[in-house]
Structure formats: C-alpha cells, structure tokens
Amino acid sequence: MNSSPGEQKSPGAAATFTLAPNAPIRLMPKILVVTGGDALPKALASAFRDVRLVVARASTLAAACELASSGEFQLVISDLELADGSWKRLLEISRHCRVNFVIILAVRTVDVRQWAQVLEEGAFDVLDIEHDIPRVPEIAKRGLWAAYLMGAPLILPEGMVH
C-alpha cells in the first residue's frame, strides 16, 4: 500500500489511514484489517469510500494481536489464515484482554459448512470478498452495533447512520 495524505505509520502495522482525515479520530470507529495481501484493503477502501472511519492494517497475526489487545478497535476484519496463525488467536486476545470487538472473516469462497463452523467458533460474520463488497458497510454497521452491545463504545460514522 502506498502512502497517502491521511496515512500514519503505527508500530506493528503496515499502515493506519483515515478515510476522512479532517474528522476527529476519537469520534470515528476503528477497524483493524488483518491480511497478508493487498486485495482486501483495496476492496474495503472502495466499499468505505464515503464512510468516515480509521482503518489500521496488520500484515501478520503477531502484529494484529498486539494492536487488537489495545482495546482501540471495535471491528476486526481478518483473513481466515495468515502465515503465522489463525484468526482464532484474535478471538483469544479479545477474551483474555477483555476487549470488545467483533471479528468478520474475509474469504474468497465459502461453503455453508465452513460459514456455520466459524460462526460457532466465535466469528461475527463471514465476508465473501468476491461477492459481498457492496454489502460491506452494512455488514460493518451490524458488527459495530454488536461490539457496542458487548461493551465497546458506540461510534457509527456519518456514512453509516441511516
């Protein structure tokens, strides 16, 4: 990912960028994207282009766990598997550190059995990045509400309030 005017480097993350650089960061939801590639961040940036939020990206599970344990994020969108581990480690961090965020898994293809299994294991939802990108803001909005019900602060960006 190339640097952009709203981009800030964070320790342990590839980049943190604000999609609405002029809005106060404390009033915007924070989403952590955990992926080893560039396709998911590009697709999400496109889906969230009219929404004010802060997105941090971690390219390894170790970096993601460090960031997730901070309690700053309400929503984590993660690949199912990364080179250094599984998304389930993020779920363990949430429970161990008592931080309230929900996890949405991003996959290229999903079958009903796999979808049901990850929901049973604790994921909030599964995002089929081949077909669900237009629905990402709605899926994220439901995730932010769920995080709020778990105890996270309620922060809905202007582009999601309807």
Image: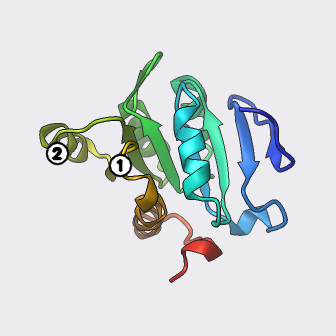
Residue 98 shown left or right of residue 69 in the figure: left
Name the amino acid, label 1. His
Disc number placed over residue 100 in the picture, else none: none
Quarter of the figure with residue 16: top right
Answer above or below: position of 34 versus 20.
above
Name the amino acid, label 2. Ala
Q: Is residue 73 visible?
A: no
Q: Position of residue 128 (x, y in %)?
A: 34, 45
At x 54%, y 25%, the residue is 36
At x 64%, y 59%, the residue is 49
Say which residue label 2 marks: 116
Answer above or below: position of 6 versus 156.
above
Disc number placed over residue 131 in the picture, else none: 1
- Mark 1 or mark 2, earlier in chain: 2
Quarter of the figure with residue 57: top right
Identify the secondary structure beneath mark 1: loop
